[in-house]
Image (cartoon, rainbow, N blue to C red):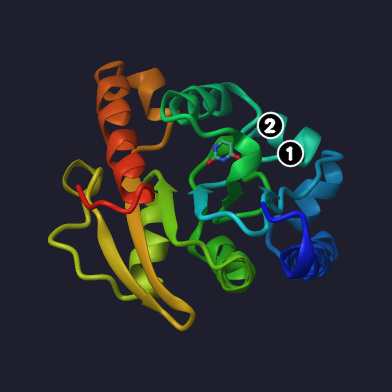
Amino acid sequence: MTTTGEGASMDGEKAARLERMAEEVRNLEASPLFAYRKENGYQPVFGEGDPDADLMLIGEAPGAQEAQTGRPFVGRAGRVLDALLESIDIQREDVYITNVVKDRPPGNRDPRAEEIQAYAPFLLRQIEVIEPRVIATLGRFAAAFVIGEYDLPRRSRRMGDLHGQVLEAHLPYGEVQVVPLYHPAAAFYNPDLEDVLQEDVQVLERVLAGGSR
Ligand code: URA
C-alpha cells in the first residue's frame, strides 16, 4: 500500500468509499439474509484488506465464524487460504478479501440466486473502487459470478476445467487477469485438491509477477 504523497490520499479515498458501501450493506434490509443475520446476532462480512491491492480474492459467502466476527475467511477455510498465500509470500494485509454474498446463508447452504443478486452491486462496486490487476475466485459460485458478469471466454463451466486457468477480463479501468481456484474448503472433503490448490497458487504467483502461466 502506498503510504506517502498522493497515493496516501488516494488510498484514503478508496477506504472511505468502501466504508460507505459497508454501511449500506449493514443497513441492507432488502437482503433475503437480513432477518437471519439479525435473529442470530450475526454481522455482515463486507470484506477487508488493502484498498489498493493488486490481488482481490473473492469467496462464496461467510460461514459461522465469519458472521460472528464480521471478517472474511477467519475459520478453517481461512487457515487454508492463509497458508496458500504464505506459500507464495503474500500476507493477508497485502490483498483484499471478500465474498460474493455478504451474509451467512443458514446452515452454510449454497447461496441462492436472489441472494447473489442482492449483493452483486456491492461486489461490482468493490472491484471498481479497488481496481485489482488480478482477481482470484475461490470456488464455483465466485467463478460463475465473475465469468458471467464480465462475459469471460471460457471453454467450460466446470471447476475441474476452470481451475488454474488465466482468463482475461476487459474492465472499464483496464485489463484484469482472473484466476479461478477451488474453494479452500474443498480440500477438507477431497485431500487431493490440496496439491491442486498449491499448484494453482503458483499460477497466481506467476500472473502477479507479470508473467503468464
Ligand atoms: N468461505 C467463504 O466462501 N467465505 C468466507 O468468508 C469463509 C468461508
Q: Is residue 94 left or right of residue 190?
A: right
Height in image: 57 above or below 65? Answer: below
Position of residue 8 measured from the top left corner of the image (x, y, whole percent): 77, 62
Amino acid residing under circle 1: Ala
Height in image: 25 above or below 174? Answer: above
The residue that appears at 53% across and 27% down in the rendered structure is: 77
Quadrant of the rendered structure where residue 133 is? bottom left
Which residue position holds label 1?
67
In-front residue for pair 7/52: 7
Q: Mark 2 near ligand 1 (CB under 8 Å)?
A: no
The residue that appears at 52% across and 53% down in the rendered structure is: 56
Q: Is residue 33 left or right of residue 152?
A: right
Position of residue 107 measured from the top left corner of the image (x, y, whole percent): 61, 35
**Figure quadrant, ligand 1:** top right
Which residue position holds label 2?
64
Height in image: 8 above or below 184? Answer: below
Tell whether label 2 touches label 1 (CB within 8 Å).
Answer: yes
